[in-house]
Image: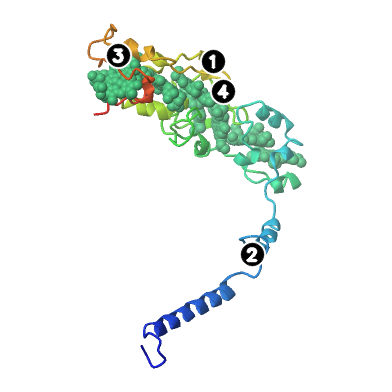
Amino acid sequence: MNKLGIPGQIVPLAIIGVVVIAAFIAARMLFVPDTFGEYGHYRASAVEEIASQEIVYAGHEACNDCHDDIFETKQESKHRDVSCEACHGPAADHIEAPDEFTPTAPRGRGYCPLCHGYNPSRPSGFPQILPKTHNPGKACMTCHDPHSPVLPHAPEDCSACHRDIANVKQVSHHATLSCRTCHDVPDEHLIQPKFVRAEKPANRERCGQCHDRDSDSPREIPRINIETHGERNLCWECHYPHYPEVGK
Ligand code: HEC
Ligand code: HEC
Ligand code: HEC
Ligand code: HEC
Ligand code: HEC
Ligand code: HEC
Ligand code: HEC
Ligand code: HEC
């Protein structure tokens, strides 16, 4: 207690409190921009600043006016959803003055792999290559028309589009199994995968053909009794089929 009857520790605490509040108010006045909070939790003048930026993209419809042949080819192709300017760069200047500004074309081998280089986070089924081993030394355009990328022939291997799964399987107990052991795949799936579906195993017997104790598969394959082993579930509710493991 001091002379005023206030506990001693209150005074320094009150001083710290006042300093903190003063610092907060000062910081708000100094650092928070004037238009902050006008519309929401952001700087209102940012809207005008962004709107006043020069437009550098023309939008892909604009290309149709003069390059309708390429435009139509692309619309019919697997690149229909890839905008012209995704490859040719911003082209607003070009449509204003086609002879003065010509867009560049990505002719080197480095560009296409930005989308097609193997990356495990891409969805399974997206066409991917390993740029180092996929026909090295030649420009992609020697074999693929960028405006209509038809494959010269159907991929021989499922890994062309399912490399993620193929990579996992390769180091698993199922490494020696062909994908088609478990999947019925029409050949058309390799060309039009979104229209012609591959099938997934439908029942436990698909696995039982090798693993059931009564099956006549090679002896080194581990056996279970298909009648009693995990009988209430599908096998792949407990074992990942592309990398089966046995819980210990
Ligand atoms: C007003 C007509 C016009 C429009 C619209 C237009 N172009 Fe062009 N483009 C041309 C002409 C003309 C040339 C040939 C110029 C030259 O050879 O000097 C050309 C050439 C090109 C080239 C070739 C460059 C090269 O390396 O040979 C590309 C790529 C191109 N345009 C892309 C586009 C894209 C992408 C769009 C849409 C954003 C577009 N153009 C819209 C008229 C147009
Ligand atoms: C996937 C990337 C990609 C897309 C999408 C793309 N282009 Fe191209 N384009 C290229 C490449 C690469 C070349 C160079 C081809 C070569 O040299 O053989 C090229 C060449 C061109 C040329 C030069 C003339 C020719 O036919 O070789 C024009 C014009 C052109 N593109 C316009 C367009 C237009 C218009 C669109 C949209 C409708 C478009 N491109 C979409 C990659 C693309
Ligand atoms: C912005 C991303 C993007 C870029 C860049 C790109 N592509 Fe594609 N490509 C796609 C998409 C999307 C598909 C369609 C995939 C699908 O059908 O699932 C595709 C499909 C393909 C296919 C498969 C066709 C088939 O029948 O299965 C080939 C080959 C291809 N592109 C080659 C190229 C080449 C060569 C370049 C460079 C000139 C290129 N791509 C650049 C996005 C891209
Ligand atoms: C010498 C010709 C040739 C060159 C060069 C070439 N490809 Fe291919 N590409 C093919 C053939 C043939 C296929 C089809 C089947 C296969 O072998 O997998 C294919 C398939 C593809 C596929 C589908 C996935 C696959 O593996 O089947 C993509 C994506 C692709 N190529 C992109 C590219 C890109 C990107 C480049 C440049 C870095 C390129 N290609 C260079 C011939 C070529
Ligand atoms: C050209 C690329 C490509 C090739 C080659 C390819 N697939 Fe596919 N696959 C896809 C795409 C894309 C999907 C996704 C289709 C969808 O979801 O619409 C898919 C889906 C699947 C599915 C899932 C079907 C479902 O109902 O969920 C299986 C299973 C499959 N593929 C197996 C295979 C097997 C096995 C091979 C080799 C014999 C193969 N695929 C070759 C592109 C391909
Ligand atoms: C031992 C049998 C077996 C083998 C071998 C096998 N699969 Fe599968 N696969 C399955 C089963 C079972 C499912 C369904 C899993 C589920 O629904 O949870 C499946 C699901 C899939 C799917 C759809 C779901 C996903 O994981 O994306 C694709 C795509 C696929 N397999 C592709 C392949 C490819 C490509 C190969 C060869 C590299 C292959 N499979 C080898 C049994 C197998
Ligand atoms: C064509 C025969 C064949 C089919 C069909 C098959 N497998 Fe296998 N499976 C094998 C072989 C071969 C091994 C490896 C034996 C070894 O490692 O020596 C194996 C191993 C296993 C293992 C043991 C892994 C470990 O850690 O020891 C499990 C679990 C398994 N498979 C589950 C399945 C499931 C689930 C299916 C159905 C989706 C299936 N298998 C379909 C041949 C098959
Ligand atoms: C409810 C979960 C579950 C289901 C469903 C299931 N398993 Fe298993 N599986 C296990 C467990 C846990 C083990 C390890 C312990 C054991 O041997 O019982 C195992 C072990 C195995 C083994 C190794 C046996 C050995 O002696 O090494 C094989 C092969 C196998 N399962 C195949 C299958 C097949 C094929 C199916 C479908 C017909 C299936 N499993 C369904 C949970 C399951």
Mark 2 C-beta closer than 8 Å to ligand 3: no
**213 vs 154, nearest the viewer:** 213
Q: Are marks 4 and 1 in contact (CB under 8 Å)?
A: no
Does residue 134 appear to the left or right of 225 in the view shown?
A: right
- The answer to whether residue 243 is above or below residue 216 is below
Which secondary structure lies at badge 2? loop
Examine the rendering and report whether any part of residue 84 can be seen: yes
The residue under the point 63% across, 30% down is: 147
Q: Nearer the viewer, mark 2 or mark 4?
A: 2
- Quarter of the picture for ligand 3? top right
- The picture places residue 89, in percent across and down from the top left corner, at 62, 44
**Tag nearer the camera, 3 or 1:** 3
Circle 4 is placed at which residue position?
Answer: 194
Estimate the x, y position of residue 21 in percent, counting from the top left: 51, 77
Tag on residue 188?
1
Label 2, on which residue?
37
| Position in image of residue 88 (x %, y %) | 62, 41
Q: Is mark 3 within 8 Å of ligand 8?
A: yes
Asked if residue 185 lies left or right of residue 209, the reply is: right
Q: Gap between marks 2 and 4, in whole Å?
A: 47 Å
How far, Cα to Cα, is label 1 from label 2? 57 Å
83 or 20, which lies in front?
20
Quadrant position of the N terminus in the picture:
bottom left
Asked if 66 appears above or below 239 in the picture, the reply is below
Q: Which residue is mark 3?
A: 211
Q: Quadrant of residue 183?
A: top left
Calculate the distance from the C-alpha at mark 2 to the C-alpha at mark 3.
66 Å
* Residue lying at 63% horizontally and 63% vertically, measured from the top left: 43
